[in-house]
Image (cartoon, rainbow, N blue to C red):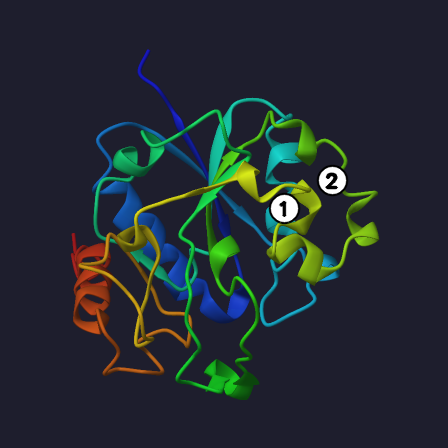
């Protein structure tokens, strides 16, 4: 049996169309099977979407075994074979991320929400996670409230920055922001989906993916 990629993605009802398009973009390009699990947990939301903290429960959901990918998903578009990303797993690390270093050009994002700068901004929006790493063992649904969003999103809970590995920047390309390096393999519309920002970078590719996903809707018997 071929290898199976475990992909967990954020789900927010306000961006439901974006999640469907992202899942389509992953499945149509992957060279190996992908199991995709959408996650939404309003009780663990301390920010602009419904999955701000629940992403850190991925190791728990995976039984603290093996590896998984986390992607915000709802505001992303996959433009490459995700098996390439999966192949970068490195057991030396607890987590591997694109280590962004930028300040946003957009103080306000979709639906009028504040878009603040902070240390390690967007690092946790795309993660290759070593679910078996011991530093994740204490993060469970009954303990996650012991941690602040800052502690989690900056990976301070790992206790050692040497546990944070890097990924090529193209795998979490933040559209319309400075210091990005493409072409994108995953385009991340962090300011908002192209339905709200039609002139965004990679908006044409997003619309093309939407049209490809819907190409059978007009079929009639």
Quarter-wise, where is residue 187 in the image?
bottom left
Q: Nearer the viewer, residue 105 or 11?
A: 105
Residue 87 is tagged as none
Where is residue 161? Give x, y as percent. Answer: 57, 44
Q: Nearer the viewer, residue 216 or 47?
A: 47
Quarter-wise, where is residue 42 in the image?
bottom right
Where is residue 194? Give x, y as percent. Answer: 30, 76
Where is residue 183? Give x, y as percent. Answer: 17, 59
Q: Residue at x 55, y 79 (%)?
A: 116
Distance (Cα) linking label 1 and label 2: 7 Å
- From the viewer's perspective, is 29 left or right of 128? left
Q: Secondary structure at mark 2?
A: loop
Q: Nearer the viewer, residue 176 or 181?
A: 181
Where is residue 178? Give x, y as percent. Answer: 32, 75
Vertical position of residue 164 compared to residue 48: above or below: above
Whether tag 1 and tag 2 are in contact, CB under 8 A, the answer is: yes
Vertical position of residue 176 compared to residue 83: above or below: below
Q: Quarter of the image containing the N terminus?
A: top left
- From the viewer's perspective, is 6 left or right of 219? right
Q: Please tell me how many numbered marks the rendered image carries.
A: 2
Judged from this view, the residue extending furthest toward the top is 1
Q: Secondary structure at mark 1?
A: helix
Q: Which residue is label 2 attached to?
A: 139
Q: Residues within 10 Å of mark 1 (few under 14, many from 20)?
A: many
Q: Which residue is label 1 attached to?
A: 56
Q: Nearer the viewer, residue 37 or 127?
A: 127
- From the viewer's perspective, is 86 left or right of 108? left
Q: Residue at x 35, y 19 (%)?
A: 3
Q: Residues within 10 Å of mark 2 (few under 14, many from 20)?
A: some
Q: Residue at x 83, y 43 (%)?
A: 142
């Amino acid at each position: 049996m071929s290898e199976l990629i475990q992909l967990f993605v954020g789900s927010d009802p306000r961006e439901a169309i974006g999640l469907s398009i992202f899942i389509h973009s992953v499945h149509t390009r992957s060279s190996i099977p992908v199991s995709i699990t959408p996650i939404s947990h309003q009780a663990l939301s301390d920010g602009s979407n419904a999955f701000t903290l629940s992403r850190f429960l991925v190791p728990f959901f995976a039984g603290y075994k093996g590896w998984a990918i986390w992607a915000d998903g709802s505001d992303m578009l996959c433009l490459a074979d995700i098996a390439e990303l999966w192949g970068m797993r490195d057991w030396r690390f607890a987590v591997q991320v694109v280590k962004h270093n930028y300040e946003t050009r957009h103080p306000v994002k979709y639906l009028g929400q504040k878009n603040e700068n902070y240390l390690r901004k967007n690092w946790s929006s795309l993660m290759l996670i070593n679910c078996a790493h011991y530093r994740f063992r204490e993060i469970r649904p009954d303990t996650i409230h012991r941690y602040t969003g800052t502690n989690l999103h900056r990976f301070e809970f790992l206790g050692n920055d040497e546990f944070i590995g890097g990924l090529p920047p193209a795998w979490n390309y933040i559209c319309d922001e400075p210091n990005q390096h493409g072409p994108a393999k995953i385009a991340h519309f962090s300011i908002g989906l192209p339905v709200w920002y039609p002139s965004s970078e990679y908006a044409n590719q997003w619309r093309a993916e939407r049209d490809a996903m819907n190409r059978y809707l007009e079929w009639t018997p």
